[in-house]
Structures are given as C-alpha cells and as structure tokens.
Image: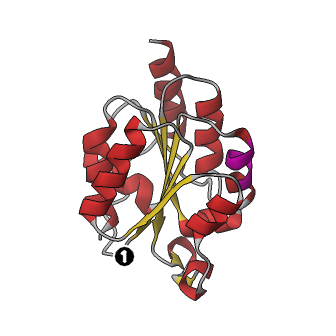
C-alpha cells in the first residue's frame, strides 16, 4: 500500500474533520491529495504530530485525525502513553509504518526489527487498535473508527514510493487557517 493512495482514502472519508499530518512526505501527500483549511501540516516537528492532534482532541468535541509515522512516534513514545492515559474518545491516530526513518536517510526503524506499535498502544491503554496492510482493510477499519468511540490507533503498513514535490506550506498560515476553522 502506498502512502499517497492511503492518504486519499483517509481524505475521502474524513469529511470536515481536522487532520494533523506528520512532517515531510506525509504532509506533502496530504497537500497533494486535497489541501484544505482543516489540514494541519507539521513541517519541522518530527515526533510531535500525534501530540498536536491529542491537544486538539482534548480541546474540542470534534473528531481529530492524526497521520503520523512510525519513525516519528518512535522518537516520542510518550505520545502513545499520554493518549492512553487521557483516553480522548474523538482521536484517531493513523501510523504510516514504512519500517524506516525516511526523513533521516532511510535507516530501518524498530518496526523493521519486530517492534509492534499496535501492541505498544494496547499496552498503553488504547483499546481500539488495528494493523492493516492494504487499502481495503484501511478503508474498513477507518470507517469503523469514524463511527466508534476512541481513541483509535491504526498502524498502516506502507511501501515507500518516489516522493511527491514539496508542498508550498507556510507554517504561520497553516496555524491561522486551522485556528480560524475552529471558530467558524
């Protein structure tokens, strides 16, 4: 499963829900799949995507979606534990697991050597977890997550492809658009 194709599946079902995207290719894929005011792009924030989404989920009744990466979550495992502690019913974390640190040179990540992030999430108290490996499974599990209280933690096994062009993101405008979308 390719991240860009999987991102299009998520965006197709997300409706107007806010989406927080991990840095680099995840942000680029989301922007190319469908830029909108409710997308929050986290350039330069490796390891903070799900923490930002958690903060949003705790401050609103709206369902919030995090598109994180295995390498980023491994750099901030405290995010998983905090989600488990806080139990936000309105948070869905999708982890694009390519089993590498793509942004730092494609070194194998811990998930390539046996770390199972869904089991980590379970051990942190996140009951709704799933690991998917194709678009059909992703679509079915994600649609269920949209209809079922969370928190949800979905590990989506992806393959790397050639990166899309860097999206023309301006961090200050991203923040303004997202804040403004909550007050509208």
Answer whether residue 163 is magenta in the image: no
Task: Name the residue rendered at 59%, 52% in the picture.
Answer: 127
Task: Name the residue rendered at 54%, 81% in the picture.
Answer: 105
Q: Is residue 23 visible?
A: no
Figure quadrant of the N terminus:
bottom left
Task: Where is residue 8? Give x, y as percent.
Answer: 26, 51
Is 127 situated above or below 4? Answer: above
Residue topped by disc 1: 160
The foreground one among 43 and 77 is: 77
Q: Secondary structure at mark 1?
A: loop
Answer whether residue 82 is magenta in the image: yes
Task: Where is residue 144? Give x, y as percent.
Answer: 36, 45
Is 127 situated above or below 173? Answer: below
Q: Is residue 175 left or right of residue 136?
A: right
Task: Name the residue rendered at 44%, 33% in the picture.
Answer: 18
- The residue carrying pointer 1 sits among few (fewer than 14), some (14 to 19) or many (20 or more) residues within 10 Å by Cα, namely some
Which residues are the magenta region?
A: 81-85
The foreground one among 82 and 11 is: 82
Q: How is the image coloured?
A: secondary structure
């Amino acid at each position: 499963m390719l991240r860009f194709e999987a991102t299009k599946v998520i965006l197709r079902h997300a409706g107007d829900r806010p989406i927080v995207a991990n840095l680099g290719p995840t942000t680029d894929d989301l922007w190319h799949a469908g830029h909108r005011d409710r997308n929050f792009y986290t350039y330069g924030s490796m390891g903070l995507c799900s923490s930002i989404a958690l903060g949003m989920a705790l401050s609103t009744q709206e369902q919030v979606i995090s598109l994180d990466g295995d390498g980023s979550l491994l750099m901030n495992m405290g995010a998983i534990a905090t989600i488990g502690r806080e139990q936000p019913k309105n948070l869905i974390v999708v982890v694009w697991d390519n089993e590498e640190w793509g942004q730092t040179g494609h070194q194998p990540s811990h998930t390539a050597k046996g770390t199972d992030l869904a089991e980590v999430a379970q051990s942190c108290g996140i009951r709704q977890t799933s690991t998917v490996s194709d678009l059909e499974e992703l679509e079915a599990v994600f649609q269920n997550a949209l209809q079922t209280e969370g928190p949800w933690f979905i590990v989506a096994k992806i393959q790397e492809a050639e990166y899309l062009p860097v999206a023309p993101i301006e961090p200050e405008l991203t923040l303004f658009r997202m804040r403004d979308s909550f007050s509208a």
